Structure formats: structure tokens, C-alpha cells
């Protein structure tokens, strides 16, 4: 077994990155007492002490593979996690999923109010781009522009926000597997793939197999989310469970059935491993993250 | 009278820039038939055929002063106008100003629906950064990062969104002139100043007097907006008039009274002209725009 390959070693690595990213996020978010204080508190509430930080973990795993500088990975990890946080705040709003529970806590519009949640999401998105646009330590400005471009493409109307819009239109309809896949490639896959690419871009152009890996892990993440939404209770999930079927949203599970959805997730996991073949031992963390994404129980 | 200084020549210049920016916006927005079509249509509805394009005009006037390339000014103008459009869509939402009329048309959430308006605003913000992150013709990547940083700072929680949050908290309260000024420097002034700075950054670092000019014009813009909100009818304004006082929002007019607010706008106009003194004839359009912002009737 290669060095660092035990479950305990992987868990320790994850814990170390999660702590590091938490500190980096706390530094990049405006101080809670800074005017407008309520807005800044809501931004921190939405972002800190929450989540598995899957996207930052992917940033670091990809960055470590290509030998990227850790200080630059901090920045990339913050940027992608801030986009993720903003999207959760807006998705939970009454006009969207109208959700009251997220990461085991009241959602931002419940804890604060709707207008503050709207503005906090808006400002979190802006902060993601601001963080990434600040001059990086010994940075290559052209690579930094490529990172900004990657994050914007993954987040906008032909990425995450576009996936949300398709999801919205699809509610109550039956979609084919191809249509569901397109929706999920945008809704979740785009930002997960971007995380892998951003990690690589901290050192240089992203190798093509890493993009393939990101695509497969991104899709697997959503398939597993659909399965967990069906299986888990709200307590385990830290958010309202079973809401997809309640809202009449088409998912992998509603389209393929649970058994074939689980099989599809397994195929994507194998595909993600296959994409990493040329990298050898350096891709250990990326392999472990593919397994983690597919085998997780929450 | 210097060349181009007549009112008709200024109007012709404005018209030409407005048409040019309309075309650039139409090109940078996703096509209306591109999936998700409804979202893309809402983004175009919110952005095209509307407004005076004050921010793009400032981008071009500042850019022309420093000899910036017109193709780069198109990009900067689009970026700042996309941020402005997104902010209008979100400001009009029921949880914010709950407005049904904007630029003489139904607001986005009235014409489409609330969820689509939320996502359209989100995606317009993303698009602003995407447009600015794409490699510019013969661009200096470091200057481009400075532009991204300028736009992000002006838009986020310590800029426009922060000003909105202060506005929200201030509703129903009485503020001092200093407090109102701080709110407006953020809410409107930051993005107007950023427009001037972005135009200059298309050629090189922004000269300090141009930053002063931007600050004064930005503040003047908001003072005049407050005066127009009091004086104008909804038909002239193209948006709901008198809503500030109806919502109990403190404004320059409610704090200073109309006469002193008008005088303050005039002082800011003189100050903007004074900031341009060292530039001579090259700053003609910037001078005319300061006058236009303060003397406009809509």
C-alpha cells in the first residue's frame, strides 16, 4: 500500500485541508463588525463552519499533484467555496427551494431575513471573483485570468446558474437520462470540475486527463446526492431530505431507479480512476476523493 | 468653443457610444434560444434596450482621454453595465424594493417570475466578471487583473451591495448627512467611480485626478436621483417615482431639503470640473458628462 493510503491517513489529510481552508475563508471574508455588519455576519454565517469542503479538497488534491504553491491553492479553494456558498444561500430562498435547514442550521433567510440573504449571496459571489483577482504570490497574471475565466464559466448561465434554471423548468416533468445528465453537468458538475481545474491552474495549464477526472467526479457527486436524498434522513444529511421527490424534481433516481443509479455512480468512479492512470502515485488523493465522493453516507 | 463642444455634438457622441455598447452587450449576452432559453431571455430583457448607459459613457469618456483602445473599452463598458443590470433586477425583487416598473417596462420578476429574476441577476453578475476575464486584444494581463479587482471592490459588500444593505437597515431611520453620504458612496458612487477607473485602466494605471472626478460625479448622480425621485412623475422617470419617501428611506432630499441638495449637486459638479483641470481639451466629454449627470431631467 503506498504511503498515505490508509483510511486514517486520508482522513487526517482531509482534516488538515479543511482546517486550512476554514482559516483562509475566515481571513478573506469581511470582519463581522465591519459596516454593514449585518450583511458581513450573514456572509460569514453562510460560509464558515459548514460543509465537507469537497471543492476545496479537490483544489488541493489537484494542486498537490502538479506541485502548486499552497498559498495559491488557498486562494483558489476560497474562491470556489465562496461561489458554492452563495449558490446555497440563493437556492434556499423562498422563491427557489424554500428551505429552512442547511448544514444542520437555519438557512440564512430564516436566521436573518430574505433581503439580507439575497444581498449576502450576491456579495459572496463578488467576493469569490475579488479574491481570485487579487495579485497572487509570484503569480503569472495570464494563468490567473484563466482561473477567473474557468470559475466564471462554471458558475454562470452556461454553468451552475444555468443548471438551476433547467432544474426549475424541469420540475414536474419527466426527463430522459441525457437531459438529466446535461442539467447535472451544469448544476453541480461544472463547479466540481472547475475546482479540479483551478487547482491545476495554480501551477500551469490543466492536463486534459484531469479535466476528464473532474467531469466524472462532478457527475458522480450529483448521482450520489440524488441517492442520499432518497435514502438518508434529514438529521444525517444536515439538510431537508427527500425534497427532490416531494418537489416533483426529476433526478437520476427517479429516472433510472436506485439500483441503476448506484451502478452508474460506480462506473463514474472507475472512470475517474482510469483518467488518473498516467499520473501514478502523485494522484493518490484524487483517487481517494473519487472514492469518498461515491461512497460517502452524507 | 472647442471642437465637439456644442450640445448637438455631445448628443451625437452619446448616441454613438450608446449604440456601440448596445451592440457589445447583445454580443456578450448568451443567445436567447440557447438552453436554458428562459434564463437567457430574462438576462437580455434586463439588460438590452434600456437606460441611459451612464456608466458605459463614463468608461468611454475616460478611455478616450487616456487614448485607450475602443475594443477594450467595449469590454469594460459591458462589464460595468452588466453589474448595474444585475443590481437593478435584484433591487426590484419583492424582498427588496418590490418594484413592478423599470425603464418603462415590467420588472424582470413581473415579466418572468421571481426565481428566474433571481437567477438572471446572479448570472448577469457572473457574466460581468467572465467578460472582463477573457483575454483582451493585445491586453496587459496585470492591468486586466486590476480591472477585475476594481469592479469586484466596487460591487461587493464594501461597495454597491454593501450600500444596499445599509439602505435596508436605514429604512425608517433618520441619518446624518455623513451617514447618508457613506451609504451613497457605496450604493451608487462606487460603481460610477469604477466606470471612470475602468476606462482609464484600459490604457494604463488610473491618474489620481480621474479618481477624484469619479468620486464626485458618483455622489452627484445619487443626489440628483434623490431630487428627481421627489420631482418627477413615473412616466418621465420610467420607474416608480416618489418611492423613497413612501418607503421611509432617508435621502439627501429628506435630510438637507431640496434646495440644499440641489446646491450640493452643483458643488459636486464644480468639483468634478476642477479635478479635470490638468487634462485640458482631452477631458471635454468627461466635463460634459458631469454636466449631463447633474442637469438631467430623468
Image (tube, coloured by chain):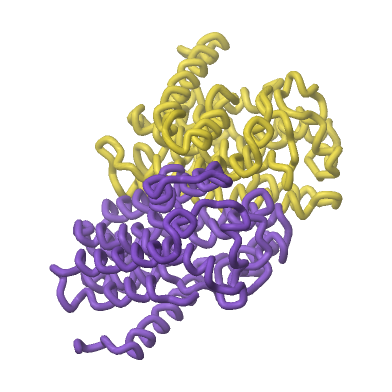
Chain colours: A purple, B yellow
Is B183 left, or right, of A283 in this rendering? Answer: right
Is B238 left, or right, of B218 in this rendering? Answer: right
Q: Residue A23: where, in percent of width, then height?
A: 48, 77
Q: Residue B26: where, in percent of width, then height?
A: 44, 26
Q: Is residue A103 above or below residue A254?
A: below
Q: Is residue A21 above or below residue B58?
A: below
Q: Is residue A171 above or below residue A244?
A: above
Q: Nearer the viewer, residue B41 or B201?
A: B41
Is A156 left, or right, of B247 in this rendering? Answer: left
Q: Nearer the viewer, residue B206 or A187?
A: A187
- Look at 34% across and 46% down and name the residue there: B143
In the figure, residue B203 lies in which quadrant?
top left
In the figure, residue A62 lies in which quadrant?
bottom left
- Look at 76% across and 34% down and name the residue there: B226
- Look at 66% across and 34% down and name the residue there: B221
Q: Residue B201: where, in percent of width, then height?
A: 39, 41
Question: Looking at the figure, which quarter contains the C terminus of chain B?
Answer: top right
- Look at 70% across and 63% down and name the residue there: A38
Q: Residue A249: where, in percent of width, then height?
A: 55, 52
Amino acid at each position: 500500500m503506498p504511503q498515505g493510503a490508509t483510511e486514517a491517513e486520508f482522513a487526517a489529510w482531509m482534516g488538515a485541508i479543511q482546517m486550512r481552508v476554514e482559516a483562509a475563508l475566515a481571513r478573506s471574508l469581511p470582519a463581522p463588525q465591519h459596516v454593514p455588519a449585518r450583511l458581513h455576519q450573514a456572509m460569514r454565517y453562510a460560509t464558515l463552519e459548514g460543509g465537507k469542503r469537497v471543492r476545496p479538497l479537490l483544489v488541493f488534491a489537484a494542486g498537490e499533484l502538479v506541485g502548486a504553491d499552497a498559498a495559491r491553492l488557498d486562494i483558489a479553494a476560497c474562491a470556489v467555496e465562496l461561489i458554492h456558498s452563495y449558490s446555497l444561500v440563493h437556492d434556499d430562498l423562498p422563491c427557489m427551494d424554500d428551505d429552512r435547514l442547511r448544514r444542520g442550521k437555519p438557512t440564512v433567510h430564516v436566521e436573518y431575513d430574505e433581503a439580507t440573504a439575497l444581498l449576502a449571496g450576491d456579495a459572496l459571489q463578488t467576493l469569490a471573483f475579488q479574491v481570485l483577482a487579487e495579485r497572487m504570490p509570484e503569480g503569472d497574471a495570464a494563468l490567473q485570468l484563466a482561473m477567473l475565466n474557468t470559475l466564471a464559466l462554471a458558475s454562470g448561465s452556461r454553468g451552475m446558474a444555468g443548471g438551476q434554471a433547467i432544474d426549475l423548468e424541469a420540475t414536474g416533468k419527466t426527463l430522459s437520462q441525457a437531459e438529466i445528465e446535461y442539467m447535472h453537468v451544469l448544476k453541480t458538475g461544472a463547479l466540481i470540475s472547475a475546482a479540479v481545474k483551478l487547482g491545476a491552474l495554480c501551477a500551469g495549464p490543466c492536463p486534459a486527463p484531469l479535466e476528464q477526472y473532474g467531469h466524472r467526479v462532478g457527475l458522480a457527486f450529483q448521482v450520489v446526492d440524488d441517492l442520499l436524498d432518497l435514502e438518508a434522513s434529514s438529521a444525517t444529511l444536515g439538510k431537508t431530505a427527500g425534497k427532490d421527490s416531494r418537489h416533483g424534481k426529476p433526478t437520476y433516481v427517479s429516472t433510472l431507479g436506485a439500483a441503476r443509479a448506484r451502478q452508474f455512480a460506480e462506473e463514474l468512479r472507475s472512470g475517474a480512476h482510469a483518467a488518473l492512470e498516467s499520473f501514478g502515485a502523485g494522484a493518490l488523493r484524487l483517487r481517494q476523493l473519487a472514492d469518498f465522493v461515491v461512497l460517502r453516507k452524507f
